[in-house]
Every structure is written in structure tokens, then in C-alpha cells.
Amino acid sequence: MRPTDYTLKGALEALAAGETTSVALTEAFLDGIARLNPRLNAYITVTAEKALEAARASDARRAAGQAGPLEGAPLAIKDLFCTAGVQTTAGSRILGGFVPPYESTVTANLLRDGAVFLGKVNLDEFAMGSSNTTSASGPVENPWSRANDPDTRLVPGGSSGGSAAAVAARLALGATATDTGGSIRQPAAFCGIAGIKPTYGRCSRFGIVAFASSLDQAGPVARTVEDCAILLKSMSGFDPRDATSADLPVPDFAAACARPVKGLRIGVPREYRLDGMAPEIEALWQQGLQWLRDQGAETVEISLPHTKYALPTYYIVAPAEASSNLARYDGVRFGLREAAKDSDLRDLYERSRAKGFGAEVRRRIMIGTYVLSAGYYDAYYLKAQKVRALIRRDFEQAWGKVDAIVTPATPSAAFGMDERQDDPVTMYLNDVFTVTANLAGLPGLAVPAGLDAQGLPLGLQVIGKPFDEEACFTVGAAIERAANFTALPGIRA
Amino acid sequence: MSYTIDGTTGPWELVIGLEVHAQVISQSKLFSGAATAFGAEPNSQVSFVDAGFPGMLPVINRECVAQAVRTGLGLNAEINLWSRFDRKNYFYADLPQGYQISQYAHPIVGQGAVEIELADGTKKTIGITRLHLEQDAGKSLHDQHPQKSFIDLNRSGVALMEIVSEPDMRSPEEAGAYLSKLRQILRYLGTCDGNMDEGSMRADVNVSVRKAGEGYRTRCEVKNVNSVKFVMQAVEAEARRQIEVWESGGTVEQETRLFDTQRGITRSMRSKEDAHDYRYFPEPDLPPLVLEQSWVDQLKASLPELPDARRARYVAMGLTPYDAHVLTLEKETAAFFETVAKGRDAKQAANWVTGDFFAALNRLKRDITDPPVTAENLGALLDLIADSTISGKIAKDVFEIMIETGKAPGAIVEERGLKQVTDTGAIEAAVADVLAKNADKVAEYRSGKDKLFGFFVGQTMKAMGGKGNPALVNEVVRKLLG
């Protein structure tokens, strides 16, 4: 077996059995990155030497009988996580070579458990985007392509496009990602891999460059649902440095993957059946529900009546928080600074921020500033908060009837790099099935479930109750087993 | 008789409200573990949170919350068990995050009251509107380099309490009395050191004027006034300015002003049109601040005695209201007095502290926190008087020697042989000697010149170097003249 074809679980077993070493795995991934990254652009920074050094140390720990749960597993880290001593860009020019002197809690947890970091992977600038085309480091290419149109380069989705593309193309066993409105689940679906956004508060946000604080959550992407479960276990846990992190025990997520779905009640929200939705998305959804019924689950139609307001609500709340979170990038203490005319402070801000932020980030800062302004706050931000509460209540009422909810992950398969770039609202529609979980703080898992007519992967989403990621894993693994998704992208190591 | 300022159109009333920013006494900052000591090297007390680095998050400091609650309790205010932090957004070089975390809509402390006393003894209650917690910004230094401004982030993130009064004050004296009283209460509570010259306490003064019987007219806010004296001056200067504007047919515009302490006038800083739109919204990095009533009750039970209560207790101990007032102004003075008075005559202790001790402080330009004589030693001196080891007169000399040498009074009395003579034989010998040397005066006395009695006592005391026990000397002189 080629080392890059291992699942995370398979690699950990092979390492434990002495069939391979962390150095061998790391070398294989670095070799794949060297060959494929010039085209895919999934990695912004490859830390080859550091990775090999870490792999050697890991092999030594294993030899000494001190193997951690992720001992020796080479992973990719979304370049939104601060990594001590390694440049962190957030996909933006404004951070201008910023090297954090500290480690994010999530990456520190992974290191604690023995993981090896291959490098930092690409993303939409400040995680704002659904196509990974807004990065200052250039767009990422999806390793999949259309069967009848192989020359059209496709987007990997976003914002965690680098994470998803790297994992799909076998350039890492798994990757960290973040999800504010769908940034884990949509790229996972576009790239034919699994990904989970856990409950808000499950993973610490400490050391993750903030986009929208009340929505941001870290989570893993990996090739299987169980691999995601293994990674999430390590990433999770209470952190006293994040006041919004939950002081709750972390369950054995991998064990949940093996549980039967028999007797589970699966909610099917009627509001997610959109006008003009592609027939193959609808067909895939019905297929997924049938697979679950075949395994003994019950499907129940439910109503989430405020769903149609979710996207506009999201595009008020997220930019509002972002406009404030991104105020610290002012050219004064770190990152890019453009010299000011006549030593004028305001001019320093304007020049640094104009040069440092890309168009999409500037657009969202302006939207966010507008919706928080005196005279508009009540009509936009306050109204959005009220609608957000209603969306949360929709779910609370549904949990009385069902144990998990299954929906499509995205309204379409991956699209071409040049498509949908003319109108930001069309781009925003990518998040239509995913934003509700962020607004309500719920866990949402994407699992590959089939291919469209062009041979591109399509995914389903499993939404769970607060802190019931286990239900997502149980249902997601059941879909994964039934789908037997074995298709592979054209570009892979 | 209420305070007014006469203009050309007659008398004007003043309406004054204060927003006081008080730095919380705590080991570390409101949302980070960085230290808060004053006067440290620039940028030596800064965490990545305070510097607004990417991915850094605020975590509330429990002790700062406790200090705010203690202050609220000390101001007889309602404690809000549910409060929330908001972000106040604006750009400035010494505001690293680009926003200040504050409590805009839901403060931790609600309405309260402070009683002030004016020079003529009248008392007045000033309402407290609210108290909220917020973080301080850093400091811009514009005088370090010809072209550049330097930034010191040591203050960035330090916890402040903003204490907002009702517009209940009507004269500069009331404003001054309120600020003094507030400072006194905070210092007693140990929640703010009240050092206005170090910037730990500063006031924004809201002033408007009106004719008797009117509602409120437009107010102006005079920012960052940093002493009680300047607050009183700023109130008067701003009131006079507004009266002039109204009387010359103009309109006072709501604006923010600064007090020029050199020229004694206020100057415009920014008008309402230039006011920032702070785009307040709930701080998403912090969950609402929820307090347990039982925790508030614990804090209440452990509050120290406050100035009004202590003053009343001193009066009950036999002190004059004036002495009780003077001794409770500063809690360090009160503590000093209590040590001196402990187990001793309170009235006598008060006399010594407000008399010789205060005189020494003034003469030596020393502070109560750096006393020339310790409270323990002053107490020991009072003991020596009480047990007749020395006379009150000798005690004054011993006190001066204590200041010079720093020694304990017992040791001084011992070393210098100042112990009072109570040996009747020795006193009789001394008196006999004086009478023998002044036979003429003895004769005059015996022929009815009673006033000479004091002369014999004085001569005896002089001969004994002041050490004779005055009562015994009197007794012996009377006997021998018999």
C-alpha cells in the first residue's frame, strides 16, 4: 500500500504495528506536496524540515513506548491557526509575514497527541469565501474535475479549500479547518471527503485568527467519518483561555461511528427543499434517507420555519463581528504597514488597510460597519439577532421529535474557478444549507454520498443537537457505509 | 441659600453630573494576566491579549468583578446579577484591538447614592446612575521624538470602573465634595487607590446652566479633569462660559471640551457632529457576566467599615465631630489613630494625633504613609504618661526626640534619665532647698501673697530638671510652707 493512501486510522494502525514510520509517511506526503502543490496551491507554507524533525521525534517516542493517540500522523493546518514560529497569513496580505510567538490551543492539542505538521494550508482571506479564490496566496484548485470537461479547473470550496484539497489529493492524512457559515462542510463536500463543524464551544478558539466570534468553530476534515472523529477528539476540550469554550467532557467520538442507527429518528426539514434545486441533489438526499431507513432509522418530516431568513441573518451577523474583529489590523503593531503621508495616523490606517485587505474582506468590513452604525443598528443587527434566536428555537423544537437532521451539504457540486465570480450574492448562496448550524451553534457533519452526472462528489449533511456530535458521527458513518464512496480525484499523490 | 452665578440677565443655576473613571486595584488586568503596577518600564506589562494580537481572546478577571461589586455595595447601589460586555469601536494608535470592551447597555451596578457634607454642615444625597467595568486604552507619547509618536501599552486592558452620577450637583463645592467623598469611599473599600495625579482616578464633568424653575438646558462635557480643585474650577469656568453664550443671544451646543488648567478656561475638543459612531454591539468573545447572589452576599459581609460609619463610631468614642471628621478623611490616618488609641484613652489619642503628630507631619512635609513616629511608639508614649512615668510636658520633649532618633519612648526616657521623680524624700529635699534660698519670698507668702505658691513649684521643677511629679511637688510645697 502506498503510504499516502492510508486513512488516518489505517496509518495509526500501521504505525502501531511497525509496518511504517512517521518519517516514511512524512516523506511520502512531502514528496506528493512537492509534485502537486505547484498546481493545486493547497499549501501556503510547507515546513518540510520541521515536519521531518517532528516525525523523527515521534518515531523515537513510539519506540520508547510513549505514543500519543495521533502519534506520527502527518496533518495539514489551515493557515488561520496561529502556529508558534511558523508564519501565519490568514490568506491575507495584511498579516505581512506575521510569525506568531504562540500556538493555538487546537494545534497545541494535536501536537500534544503526537501529530506531525506538514505545513499551513490555503484558505479564503480571513476565511471569507466559499471558493478559496479570495486568498492573497492565490486560488486553490480542486483535485477533482468534470468527466466531460476535464480542462475546466474547479474550486475546492471555501473557506477551508486548502484543507479539503490537500486531504482529497492525499497531501495529508487529515487537516484542521474552521467553519463560520459552512467553511468546513462545503469544501469537504466539493472535494469528496468528510468534515465536521462541532458544537460552538467544543473546540477552543484561542489562537485562531477570528472572523466572526459567535459563529467560528474549528473542526477537522479527513477522508473518512471515523478519521474526523479521531481528530476531533484530540482537537476538543475546555480551554480557560477561551471564555466561550465549553467545560464538558469529550466523548469517544470514534466509538460513536460504530453504533447502529436503528431506532434513530432522522429529521427531514421541508424548508431545505429549495425551488429550482438540482434534481440530482434531491435524488441524493432521498437516497441517503433511504439508506438510513434500510438500516432501521425512522425518517420524520419536520419544519424549521425560519430557514429562509438564515442566509440574510448570517450576512448581517458575520460581517458585523468581522468589521470589529479586523480593526486590529491597523499597521501599528504587526503585519503590513504602508507609510503614511505627513505622518498622519488616519492615512496610515487607510493605506495599510486598503493595501492589506482584498476586495471581499473590504466588502464585508463595509457591510459590517454599516449594519452596526447609529440609525441602522436596530433595523439590521438587532433584527438579525432576533431572527437568530428564532432559528435557534426552530431547532430546539425539532429536537423534541428527532435525534438528528439530514440535509444536502451544498446546493451544487464544485463549480469552475471562473464561474459565479461576478455576483457576491450568488457566491453567498453556497452556504444556504450550512449557515443554520452556525447560527444555532449546532454540530454539522458533511459526508461524501455520491457523484453527480459529471462525476463530481456530492455530500450530505448531518446536523446534531448541541454537544451531540456523536449522533452526527453515528448517522454520518451509516451513510458512508451505505454509499461506499470509493471514487478518487484525478489529481492525487 | 442655593448657589447661583449672576449674569447680566440675573442669577443662573448650575446643573452638574460627573462620570468618574476609577482604576480598579487588582494584581492583573481586566481580561489578561498582565500586571498593573504604575510606573513600570513602557511596554513591560503587556500580554498578547492587551496588544490585540491575532487569535487572542479576553477572559474576565474574577477579582476585578469582585472589586466592582464591592464598590457598588459601598455606594449603596443595586448589584445586577446579569450584566454584559459590549464593544465600543474606534480606531486609535493606543487602542490595539480597535475597540474597547465596556458595558454599555447592561452595567454590573445600577442605581445608588452618596451622601456629601458641605462646609456649612448641610448634607445632600447625590444619586449614582450606574457603575460599569471597562478596559483602559494604552498611552500615546508625543514628546519622545520629533516626528514619531510612541505607544506604551502598560495601561492597555487595565480595569476601570466608570461611575456615573445623576445631574444632582448644583455648585462647584458640591461637585468637589462629591468627588472627594467618592474617592474616600473607594479608598476605604480598597477598590481604587484614588491617586489622581497618577491618573488612577479622573472625572468627566457635565455642566449646564439654567434659570430658576427651568428644565435642563444643553450640557457640555469637560473631559479628563484630574483633581478635586480642577473639577471645581472647571465647573465654574464652563458655567460662566455658557452663561455668556446664552446671554449674548447664542445657543450652547452639546460638545466635548477640555479644561486648560493654566488659563482656567475650557476649550472645545470636538462637537456633536464630529462625535464618533462607536458601533456598540455585544462582545461575542465573552458570555454574559452572571453573578451568584450568595457570592455578592459574601462580599457584602466582608466589606470594611466605611467613612460615615467610622466617623459616627469615633464620635461615640468621645471624640469631637471635628476630630472624627479629620481623622477619617484618609483611611491611613484612621488606621494610624486606631493603633494609637487601641486600649488607651481615645480622646487623648485623638489630641496627640491631631495636635503634635499632625504638626510634625506638616513641619517635616511627611505623609501619613511615611510617619516620622510610628503609631505603636506614639501609643507607648501615651502609656508612659498614663502610668506617671513621665509628665505630659516631658512627653512633648520625648516626642521630639522620637522624631529625631526614631527610638522608642521607653528607651529615650531610660537613656536620658527623664523618668519622673516620685520619691517624696528627694522632692522634700529639693523643696526645702528652694525655700531656704528664697526666705524673703517665703515670708511674703506667709504674709498673704498666695500667688507665690506657683513660684515655689516652678523653682522646684526647674531644680529637678522638670522630672518631679507635678502632683507630688505641689503637695510637698504646700506641706513645707504649711
Image (cartoon, coloured by chain):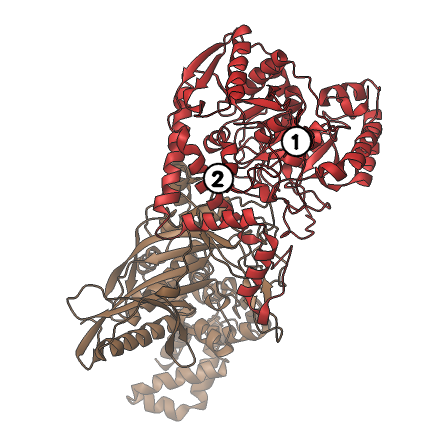
Chain colours: A red, B brown
Q: Is residue B345 visible?
A: no
For mark 1, name the chain.
A
Give whichever of A69, B331 is nearer the camera.
Answer: A69
Amino acid, disc 2: Val
State the separation of the CA atoms marked 1 and 2: 23 Å
Look at the numbered disc 2 and give the secondary structure of its residue: helix
> What residue occupies the far front of the structure in this picture?
A148
- Where does the image place residue B362, in percent across and percent down from the top left? 46, 76
Question: Which residue is rendered at x = 37% and y = 88% of the image?
Answer: B442
Quarter containing the C terminus of chain B: bottom left
Query: Dot 1: few (<14), some (14–19), or many (≥20) neighbours within 10 Å?
Result: many
- The numbered mark 2 sits on a residue in which chain? A
Residue positioned 76% across, 27% down in the render: A71
Q: Which residue is mark 2?
A: A425
First reached walking from the N terminus: tag 1 or tag 2: 1
User: Does residue A51 lie above or below A344 as drawn?
Assistant: above
**Residue that protrudes farthest toward the left in the picture:** B213
Q: Position of residue A23 (x, y in %)?
A: 84, 30
Q: Are the residues at dot 1 and dot 2 in contact (C-beta closer than 8 Å)?
A: no
Percent from the top left, x then y, of residue A40?
72, 36
Q: Quadrant of the N terminus of chain B?
A: bottom left
| Residue at image mark 1 | A164
From the top left corner, tell me how far across and down residue B356 is, in percent.
Answer: 44, 74
Residue B122 against residue A390 in the figure, above or below: below
**Badge number at residue B93:** none
User: Is B359 or A400 nearer to us in this picture?
Assistant: A400
Q: Is residue A3 visible?
A: yes
Q: Are marks 1 and 2 on the same chain?
A: yes
Give the quarter of the image for residue B128: bottom left
